[in-house]
Amino acid sequence: MSDHVILVDLADRELGTAEKGEAHRAGALHRAFSIFVFNSAGALMLQRRARTKYHSGGLWTNTCCGHPRPFEPIQEAVHRRLREEMGFDCDLKEIFSFTYKVQFDNSPLLEHEYDHVFVGAYEGDATPSPEEVDGWRWMDLGTLRKDIRENSDCYTYWLRICLERVVTHLDGERHMLGNGRGPSTGDSQ
């Protein structure tokens, strides 16, 4: 059942499962996750989605995204998918979740996700799956935020809507720790 997603309500309570393509055609709310991996300089690892992906192909996005399989705990799914998609693993921590709904341009697909957002730290290179990823790079957050403002159509919808919340969370955590380490937000927007 790896091609099935977990259907949920607005409180993330499981309602059943659906075939992934059917869930996206119907716009059914389903569980998903987004992973943001940073290096010690505070740069975010971005990936360019493979052009052959069923939606958002060729767009830049956060490090990794996916759906837990039915009966798979999300904490296991994030590590499985990071290894499958980007070829490495690291410690990951969930920082928030949000719900979004978007109709993709020139497509019958409707993305409606309850998205759990995870962050991690990593210093190495990625060895991504060519079926999933066309390229990757590290980008500092100031440059990324500026480029999203100027070239939003080059980035996935979910990255554009949750990046500021990720930055706010990490800035708050860094200030609470009082060590000044962690992602640098670059500009103040």
Image: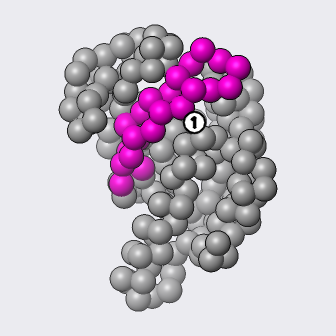
Residue 135 in the image: x percent, y percent? 75, 41
Residue 141 in the image: x percent, y percent? 65, 66
**Majority secondary structure of the magenta segment?**
strand
At label 1, the amino acid type is Glu
Depicted 112 relative to depicted 166: above or below: above
Does residue 74 appear anywhere in the picture? yes
Element class at badge 1:
helix
Residue 92 in the image: x percent, y percent? 40, 54
Span highlighted in magenta in the image: 96-117
Q: Report the residue at 26% width, 30% height from top.
A: 9
In the picture as drawn, the residue positioned furthest to the right comes out as 150
**Is residue 1 found left or right of 44 in the rendered image?**
left
Residue 126 in the image: x percent, y percent? 65, 48
Figure label count: 1
Q: Report the residue at 36% width, 32% height from top.
A: 31
Q: Report the residue at 44% width, 29% height from top.
A: 112
**Is residue 78 found left or right of 164 in the rendered image?**
left
Does residue 130 appear anywhere in the picture? no
Is residue 53 in the magenta section? no
**Is residue 89 found left or right of 138 in the rendered image?**
left
Depicted 123 relative to depicted 87: above or below: below
Can you tell which quarter of the image residue 49 is in?
A: top right
| Within-10-Å neighbours for mark 1: few <14, some 14–19, many 20+ | many
Can you tell which quarter of the image residue 174 is in?
A: bottom left
Identify the image quadrant of the N terminus. Answer: top left
Is residue 109 in the magenta section? yes
In the picture as drawn, the residue positioned furthest to the bottom comes out as 178
Q: Report the residue at 36% width, 58% height from top.
A: 95
Q: Which residue is mark 1?
A: 85
